[in-house]
Amino acid sequence: MLPLSLLTWNTLAPVYFRGRGDTVEAQFPERVLARHARICEALIDSNADVICLQEHWFDAELCRFYRKRLVQDAAFRYEALQRTAWNSDGRSEDGVAMFVRKGVEVVQRHDVRFHDYGIPQDRVALILVLRDARPAAGEARPRAPLLAVLCTHLTYPHSVHDERARLAQIGACIAAAQEKVPRGMPVVLAGDLNGPSVDGVSGVLRAAGFRNVWEEVHGRPCGVTHVDHRGANFASDHVWIRGGLSPTSAQLLPAAVPDTSALRRPAIGAAADCSLDGAGEEKQEDEEAARPRSFDAWCDLSDHRPLLVSLAWPE
């Protein structure tokens, strides 16, 4: 069987991307599209089979752009779930999204709304049951095994109340997986958990039989995947697995930059500037120009780094 590659990335919703004063990126549609053009090129270049995005903005124009670039041009299937705003004024404009490459079939979809589990918050998770029908070299017919992938985004821990909320939210994710995923099926839980792999949320995951992919590959916790609004750097983004899958690789993008490297906060409009190669020569092709060409350029795409993992099926 071919290994399955999965990428998770919080792409910083334009409504939360703040500049000076009360400015947010959402006020500048051309800058939003320029940044997300670079994000889409990075997603395509990753060659991931499954992409899990958090803070996916449900603006109509941006959704159309993702459908054009990733669905029409790159042959992904697009599934998304917006936050419910069950306990807030107006509808939250972001949520989670998953893109599944052709050859990996979506068998079932399950929407998980945390308020259905007694949590007075509007966050969500999305579960897709997938069939890997990609034929490997020399195989007349693929075995087409099944797995479930859950994508979520937990609350930022501003306070003790938020820490308790995060524990309740991950409990809802585990409960949903137990309710909706057949017993024995491998489960992948990916997303922005807003905490390192040694906190209380991680303890709940381990108690439920999940293993942290980065730790299994590297033998230690991941260093830095996120710079928060206070300027703190920590590992916020994770992939956890349960069942027969075995991790074969785990890397942050860009791959040449170690996970101990600190990120800087992105600046509104910086991703709209022309990308230059190492010699300072401007690329003429639109798609090539959209690709980030340095770690500094990556830092202007989001306040998170993408985490890309490869998972092997049991023999």
Image (spheres, rainbow, N blue to C red):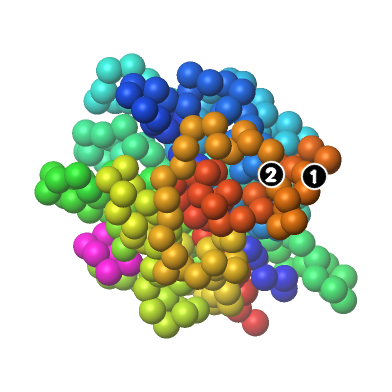
Note whether residue 58 is visible. Answer: yes
Q: Residue 222 in magenta?
A: no
Note whether residue 185 is visible. Answer: no
What residue did someone put label 1 on? Answer: 283
What residue did someone put label 2 on? Answer: 275
| Amino acid at the residue labelled 2 | Ser
Q: Position of residue 202 (x, y in %)?
A: 29, 65
Marking on residue 242: none
Tell me the residue at 63%/63% (across/down): 5
Query: In this view, which residue lies farthest toward the left?
Result: 160
Q: Is label 2 in contact with label 1 (beta carbons under 8 Å)?
A: yes
Q: Of residues 238 and 232, which is closer to you in this image?
A: 232
Q: Is residue 223 left or right of residue 37?
A: left
Q: Secondary structure at mark 2?
A: loop
Tell me the residue at 47%/80% (across/down): 218
Q: Of residues 295 and 165, which is closer to you in this image?
A: 295
Q: Position of residue 266 (x, y in %)?
A: 46, 42
User: Image height check: is 274 above or below 9?
Assistant: above
Identify the magenta region. 197-202
